[in-house]
Image (cartoon, grey):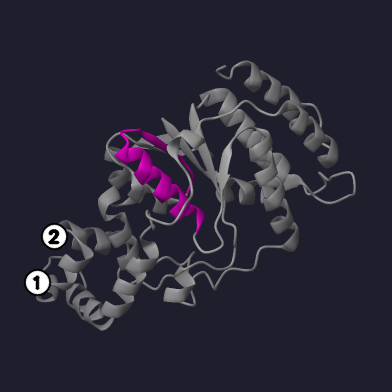
Amino acid sequence: MLYLVDASVFIFRAYYSVPVEIADRDGNPVNAVHGFARFLAHLLERELPAQIAVAFDESLETSYRNEIYPAYKANREPAPAELKRQFALCREVCTALGLAQYGSSRYEADDIIGTLARRAQAAGMPVTIVSRDKDLTQLLSADDTYWDAIADVRYRHADIEERFGATPERMADFLALMGDAVDNIPGVTGVGRKTAQKLLKHFDTLPGVFENLDAVKLLKFRGASFVADSLREHRDDAFMSRQLTGIACDMPLACELHELRRRPPDLARVDAFCELQNFGRMLRDQARRIHARCPA
């Protein structure tokens, strides 16, 4: 089993939920690092993954998707400078704990996870995706798991449609039809979750919907004629949105699967890191317990 961790979800959560008063020896806030380190150490103690990788958003503002649609994520406030500094420290935590970690200036963490997931699946290795981003459910095969580690709920391939509205195979089409206000993806005006579900139920794929626009008007739901007209008007938006919602599973990434084997924590490095960040005993003690349970 390969665990793939979407770091940003847990770093942002820690930044906004852990008291900012937690600071290093120079008085710089390290609340996000503290929360993220605790999360990672807890995951390692609980799951004892044989193979694991942590994916980071190296650039929090741009990716290749902005080349397709410059307004992608433009509605978001820039990440605070203090949080950007802590992202780098979170990568140091991964290294100290013996975890492979990856980032890219052009691709997002989702694409790193997608690329590693496809390589693992091709090798017959089941994957557990650790995140709270529904976009990543599109990566699941029948043997995989999506773990919302914040709610501590796990979903298998067969659970995704009921929970999120579409099967993994159709999730990118589903999101392209609806759009995504969080990522500033336009989608199609007038198409929400229920309408997108109806369209994909009848026509299976995004191209299938647009190949049958006259048939959309005949569907039995309120506003079907308006939806058909809106689809015709916003065709380009829909297919452009599909380029944004799809995860790039073939990005250039210098990594072999054997490199994802979990290594024992570097206890000296953990101690030095904790000293610099003014951490207490918890992470050091966890690292020692994890080290004791690592395979030789």
- Of residues 49 and 237, the one nearer the viewer is 49
Q: Quadrant of residue 180?
A: bottom left
Give the residues drawn in magenta, as a range: 108-132
Quadrant of image for the N terminus: top left
**Residue with the mark numbered 2:** 202
* Earlier residue among tags 2 and 1: 2
Residue beneath the point at 90% across and 49% down: 26
**Labels 2 and 1 touching (C-beta < 8 A):** yes
The relative height of residue 88 versus residue 99 in the rendered view (above or below) is below
* Quarter of the rendering containing residue 35: top right
Q: Position of residue 270 (x, y in %)?
A: 74, 32
- Asked if residue 78 is positioned above or below residue 255 in the image, the reply reads below
Disc 1, SS:
helix
The residue wearing badge 1 is 215
Residue 292 is left or right of residue 109, and the answer is right
Please tell me which residue lies in front, 265 or 28: 265
Q: Residue 202 at x, y = what percent?
A: 13, 60
Residue 115 is one of the magenta-drawn residues: yes
